[in-house]
Image (cartoon, rainbow, N blue to C red):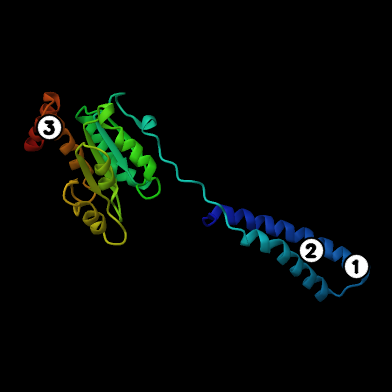
Amino acid sequence: MTRRSAQEWAGLVVAFVVAGIFVAFGAAVLGSFVGLPVPAIVLLVVLALAVLAYPIFRTPVASAPVEAVPATERTVMSDAPLVGIVMGSQSDMAVMEECSRTLESMGVPYELLVASAHRQPAVVHEWASGLADRGVKVVIAAAGKAAHLGGVVAACTPLPVIAVPMKTSDLGGLDSLLSMVQMPSGVPVACVAINGARNAAILAAQILGTSMPEYRAAVERLKSDMAGS
């Protein structure tokens, strides 16, 4: 269940006012026929509106299920991605766009999935388990607060996982950072700085560059550009 939005509340109020006008008109007509005094008509209107409004305003609204964006619909640059990016919420996209832009600038094909390890564990497990078989080499996982998304992915794949802790309104991202770096022995997750999306992309390219010369060259060009700026 979820709360109604402001637009839904506004619609209910408008409907309630319109219903009130009709009820008041009907009560006035009825009162004129039977000779009811004005206070009695007002009380009748109030009671009628209360009876109409109570079930409407008390009924909870069912929330729509949170759906992940399928990775196949978010594949960018290539049908054979080398980097898989996953983030726990659509709100993380504002930060993670820098990651995708950096990968694109270095010519690294990737795919992107929005799925929560808490709300959609089956989606995350299925996606992470199939990455290696599809040719993906590195995973970047971004999440905030109870940010064990990177750890869940690392438990489902033999691929190296780079975690990006998201800055939060509660603890400034320290909660995300600690959730990611405190992994148990045997399930390592590399971790960049809070909101360190660009570094995650560069690190992914460096990992690819250990066996793919074109990406090592892309990293070298990046370092050369930074040295000359």
Who's the residue at 90% across and 67% down the image? Answer: 32
Q: Which residue is under mark 2?
A: 24
Front residue (pair 227, 148) = 148
The amino acid sitting under disc 3 is Val
- Pointer 2 or 3: first along the chain: 2
The amino acid sitting under disc 1 is Ser
Bin the neighbour count of mark 3 within 10 Å (Cα to Cα): few under 14, some 14-19, many 20 and up.
Answer: some
Front residue (pair 49, 160) = 160
Circles 3 and 1, Cβ within 8 Å, touching? The answer is no
Image quarter (top left, top right, bottom left or bottom right) of the C terminus:
top left
Q: Which residue is under mark 1?
A: 32
Circles 2 and 1, Cβ within 8 Å, touching? The answer is no
Q: Position of residue 122 (x, y in %)?
A: 38, 42
Front residue (pair 40, 163) = 163
The amino acid sitting under disc 2 is Ala
Bin the neighbour count of mark 1 within 10 Å (Cα to Cα): few under 14, some 14-19, many 20 and up.
Answer: few
- Pointer 2 or 1: first along the chain: 2
Q: Secondary structure at mark 3?
A: helix
Q: Secondary structure at mark 1?
A: helix
The quadrant in which residue 159 appears is: top left
Q: In front of the other: label 2 or label 3? A: 3
Q: Position of residue 153 (x, y in %)?
A: 27, 42
> Left of 106 or right of it: where is 129?
right
Q: CA distance from mark 2 to mark 1?
A: 12 Å
Q: Which residue is under mark 3?
A: 219
The quadrant in which residue 36 appears is: bottom right
